[in-house]
C-alpha cells in the first residue's frame, strides 16, 4: 500500500511539474510539501534527495539542469541515485522558512545543491560554482560530486582485512 501511495504521489508530482509548461521552478509550489514527498520517495527507494535551489530567472540554474539532462552519464547517475527537486527561490517566493531548515544554502548563490538523506537530514550543500568550467559545467566534476553523495558512498565502510 505504501509503494502504491508513493507511486501515486510521484505520478502527481511529475504531472504537475510537466503541466508548468516546462518551467523548471514553480514559485507557487509548496516547498515543504515538495521536500516531504521527495524524502518519502527517496526513503522508499533507498536514494538520497538532490535539491537544486534556484529560479527560472537564473540562467546558471537552467544551464545546470540542461547540462545534467544532456549528459547521459550524469542523467543516469542522477536518476539512479537521487530524487530530484527543483526548489524555487525568486522575488515571488524565496522560501526562506524552508531554506532556513536547510541551513540557508542561498548564501552560496544559485543554483545551489543540497543533498538530503532518506530521513530528510541535510548531509551536504554544494556551491555549484565549484562545478563550473569555461562558461559551463565540468562533467568530471559533476559526476564526482554526484558519486560522492550517493547513499552507497555515504554509507560506505571499508571492511577490515
Image: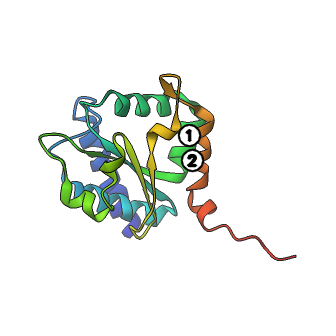
Return the x and y of residue 78 as percentages of the image width and height: 52, 45
Rendered position, 123 above or below 113: below
Residue 26, position as x, y percentages in the image: 21, 41
The reply to whether discs 1 and 2 touch (Cβ–Cβ < 8 Å) is yes
In the rendered image, the quadrant that contains the C terminus is bottom right
Question: Which of the 4 quarters of the picture holds residue 53?
Answer: top left
Q: Is residue 78 above or below residue 97?
A: above
Q: Is 17 on the left or on the right of 117, as rendered?
A: left
Q: Looking at this rendering, what residue extends furthest in the bottom direction?
A: 160
Instruction: Left or right? Give the position of 74 relative to 58.
Output: right
Q: Residue furthest top?
A: 135
Residue at far right of view: 161
> Is the residue marked by circle 1 packed among few (<14), some (14-19), or many (20+) residues within 10 Å?
some
> Where does residue 117 sit, x and y in percent of width and height?
46, 65
* Residue placed furthest toward the front: 107
**How far across and down, in percent of the image, does residue 152 sit?**
62, 62
Q: Secondary structure at mark 2?
A: helix
Pointer 1 residue: 142
Residue in the image at 53% along x and 23% along y: 134
The mark found on residue 2 in the picture is: none
Q: Is residue 16 left or right of residue 128?
A: left
Q: For residue 145, which numbered disc appears in the image?
A: 2
User: Within 10 angstroms of label 2, few (less than 14), some, or many (20 or more) residues?
Assistant: some
Quadrant including the N terminus? bottom left
CA separation, marks 1 and 2?
5 Å
Q: Which residue is drawn at the image coordinates 57% and 31% (left, top)?
A: 138
Q: Which type of secondary structure does the marked residue at label 1 adopt?
A: helix
At a point 37% along the width and 63% down the height, the residue shown is 39
Residue nearer the viewer, 135 or 69: 135
Amino acid at each position: 500500500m505504501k509503494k502504491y501511495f508513493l507511486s501515486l504521489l510521484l505520478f502527481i508530482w511529475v504531472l504537475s511539474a510537466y503541466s508548468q509548461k516546462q518551467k523548471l521552478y514553480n514559485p507557487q509550489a509548496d516547498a515543504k510539501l515538495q521536500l516531504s514527498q521527495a524524502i518519502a520517495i527517496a526513503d522508499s527507494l533507498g536514494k538520497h534527495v538532490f535539491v537544486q535551489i534556484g529560479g527560472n530567472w537564473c540562467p546558471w540554474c537552467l544551464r545546470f539542469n540542461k547540462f545534467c539532462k544532456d549528459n547521459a552519464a550524469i542523467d543516469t547517475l542522477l536518476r539512479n541515485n537521487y530524487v530530484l527537486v527543483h526548489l524555487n527561490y525568486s522575488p515571488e517566493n524565496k522560501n526562506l522558512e524552508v531554506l532556513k531548515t536547510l541551513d540557508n544554502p542561498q548564501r552560496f548563490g544559485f543554483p545551489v545543491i543540497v543533498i538530503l538523506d532518506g530521513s530528510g537530514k541535510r548531509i551536504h550543500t554544494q556551491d555549484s560554482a565549484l562545478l563550473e568550467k569555461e562558461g559551463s559545467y565540468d562533467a568530471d566534476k559533476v559526476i564526482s560530486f554526484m558519486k560522492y553523495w550517493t547513499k552507497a558512498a555515504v554509507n560506505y565502510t571499508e571492511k577490515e582485512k
